[in-house]
Image (cartoon, coloured by chain):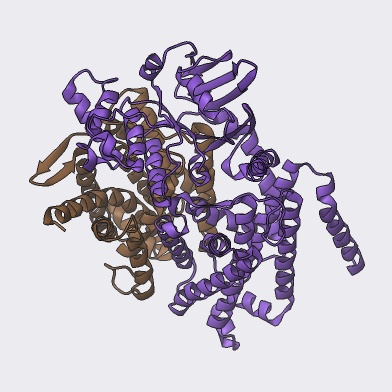
Chain colours: A purple, B brown
Amino acid sequence: MTTLGQAALAAVALLFMLSAPAFLSEHQIHILIQILFFAYLSSCWNILGGFTGQLSFGHALFLAVGAYTSTLLLLQLGVSPWIGMLAGGTLAGALGLFIGYLSFQYGIKGTFFVLVTLAFTEIARIIALNTSAIGGASGLYIPIRGNDLWHLKFVNKSHYYYLIFGLLLIVLAVTAWLERSRTGHRLVAIRENEDAAEALGINLLRYKLLATALSAFLTALGGTFYAHYVTFIDPSTLLNMNMALEITIYSIVGGIGTLLGPLLGAAVLVPIAETVRAEFGHNYAGVDERGQAMSLLDVQGVTRSFGGLRAVSNLSFAVERGSILGLIGPNGAGKTTTFSLISGFDQPSAGQVLFKGERITGLSPDVICLRGLTRTFQIMQAFPKLTVLQNVMIGAYARHRAVAAARAHATEVLQKLGMAARVDEQARNLTLADLKRLEIAKALATSPELLLLDEVVSGLTPTEVEELVGLIRNIRADGVTIVMIEHVMQAIMALSDTIVVMHHGEKIFEGQPRQVATNPAVVQAYLGEELAVA
Amino acid sequence: MSSALVLQAIVSGLLLGGVYSLICVGLTLTFGVMRIINFAHGEFLMVAMYATYFFAVGFKTEPYAAIVVVLPGLFLFGVLVFHFLIRPIQSRDPLNQMLLLVGLSLVLQNGALALFSPDTRAHQSSLLYSKLELGDVIIGMPMLIAFVVSILITLALYWQLRFTELGRMIRAAASDRGAAELMGINVNRVNMLAFGMGIGCLGVAAPLIMPVYYVVPDIGTFFILIAFVVVVLGGLGNFVGAMLASFLVAIAQSIGALFMPGSTAPVLPFLLFILVLLFKPEGLFGRPAR
């Protein structure tokens, strides 16, 4: 093809990409953003992995550095994410130099470089999980605040689309320059044969470090984009091995060490992944041992009217066994009423609730509890004059007739919740944090299969929130399915597999945590609330 | 810090080391065969754990009974993977082989996600809460069983490689492929068997750890990073080294947990790993190569 033809083709493609948001739906733009985002990351990785031949599985680390630096600067000091972006990039570049220097100076390459970069990422993950100053396990949440270019906050997705598209153009320009420049040619020479390259006067260490720092810097810019697009970051999402692999995979599939390979790989794989997820992800979740698709809890068209007011209106959702579902919404949205309707404290005006495939609507709370579904209360309902152990034993009696057995079971539950030291205290002497734990312990002592938690995190200090998030994770790991109402977004985002958003008694959204913050209806509901308060 | 606590930490570390060792001897064996690290090792373990789970639930048995099916099953699975996936690209760049295994791990993990859902599944043994109490130290029975069996397996593999005909052939094929072929060894067949054995180890590991862990589609990633650390520390391809490194890593973790803030102790193995790669790349127990 002639140069003129190529230029024309490029111009058409550019025009198409620039005008795309005008005729695509929100969801389509979201997928396009994901394609561009991963094409961007993989292109950054490609500079080191593809051109220089140093396979890194540590780019998730650089991504996280970018995300955390800009988010922390914004939350702690109010610094604009644009500045945070450059700061994160610089920090990641320096980190890249450090890791690269250690590795290349000591002759680590090939598989061992892969393992070293993985090891650094894992160390970072463990440290991040344990550092409450940067959010610890529950991560950081960027509040939704309407349109503001300086703070990188947009209600409309197309702005994010243009931002990531711009970043992609930058990395492609850098790559195209590398392909034609002396530096790029020397990097390729290093990849192909280090000894030969060195014999021809190339300083291996210097060029490898240059590629590492550049690649890390650019990757971190993508991290800042991610943090502000998704508005939630945590170590388990950013610093895990799958993220590290995902960054590399698009280059490898699309063509490692080529200019457009990463873009091609992402353009093909991301939509496939999305489609497969949409087609099969839902159908297969919760298939039980008998091979039948059955949700543990199935809320079907439940309505509750008080006079003319509909507190809950035609609400439906399902909870899969082993999952955590977060129920959120502005005050008065009908969340606690929903809990009462499920747990039998209140009866719906219409609709029904199925638990393990059987109708439980109309049963009393104690019967429902014995079937394996119980709740906690937003306003703690401890037995004030009983000791902590006695409180929890009351719950244990649901499954144990003998006092000794109930005591043993209650002790075990209290140990799991880290309250072993408090067993003999009277409930009325407990701190708020311990009361919340006691509330969970009582419910857990009934050995539920499904646990409804009503605002167990609200009102706690950040450190206490984080501890409780860890405990709730453990409870789920023990096989208990959880539905939780919560106002603390960090906890909800960190814990939930699925989030249902209620507003004025209706479900306005159901999806993954990372989709919630970018959903216009949800943003509207919360913004409206904030404006009303202000 | 009371001495009882430290003693308990050492014992717990030893027991955990047994679990690591079960997983790592297989990994180090497959490394000896392929000369690359098997990135799908954790997913083979995941497959073995699901097989154990469904066997134990389906036949209403203890998880341990599943060994009779899962061990030969995993061996066969390993043999098939070697024959159809690894053998065809054995002459290529090692990094390509590694990426193939990365791809296999993603396919297995997501396949499990689609088939079994992300639910956690645990099958508790009746032994779960039985324990030995020696003074102040408590030893959980399932961990003790895993520990003892892991040592037996490591010793059995060591003996087999040292003193049997097949073992000699495996070592010959690993150290010099061309020379082994000239001696009339069918290197492909030998490597296939060795790879099958390495994966087969997981067929023992899974039933042994099922009573104490639960299985989810990404359980492999939980173990695999530690496993990489262990085989490198032990000296790649070195069984006894892998076993000793397992204990070292696990004890470092459990003692570290006493002294380090929060739950930061798991960084110790990775720090150790980076230091060893930098300064003693042949592993803690290996002799300098070449």
x and y, in percent, of residue B175 in the image: 37, 65
x and y, in percent, of residue A330 in the image: 59, 36
* In the foreground, B279 or A149: A149
Q: Residue at x 20, y 30 (%)?
A: A408
The image shows residue A335, relative to residue B80, as above or below, that is: above
Does the image show residue A147?
yes
Does the image show residue A294?
no
x and y, in percent, of residue A17 in the image: 81, 54
x and y, in percent, of residue A243 in the image: 54, 53
Q: Residue furthest front?
A: A534
* In the foreground, A52 or A139: A139
The image shows residue A190, relative to residue A127, as above or below, that is: below
Q: Residue at x 44, y 61 (%)?
A: A124
Question: Is residue B270 toward the left or the right of residue A357 in the image?
Answer: left
Q: Residue furthest left?
A: B135
Q: Quadrant of residue A508?
A: top right
Question: Is residue A348 toward the left or the right of residue A427 in the image?
Answer: right
In the rendered view of the protein, which quadrant contains the N terminus of chain A? bottom right
* In the foreground, A62 or A261: A62
* In the foreground, B39 or A157: A157
Q: Residue at x 59, y 63 (%)?
A: A78
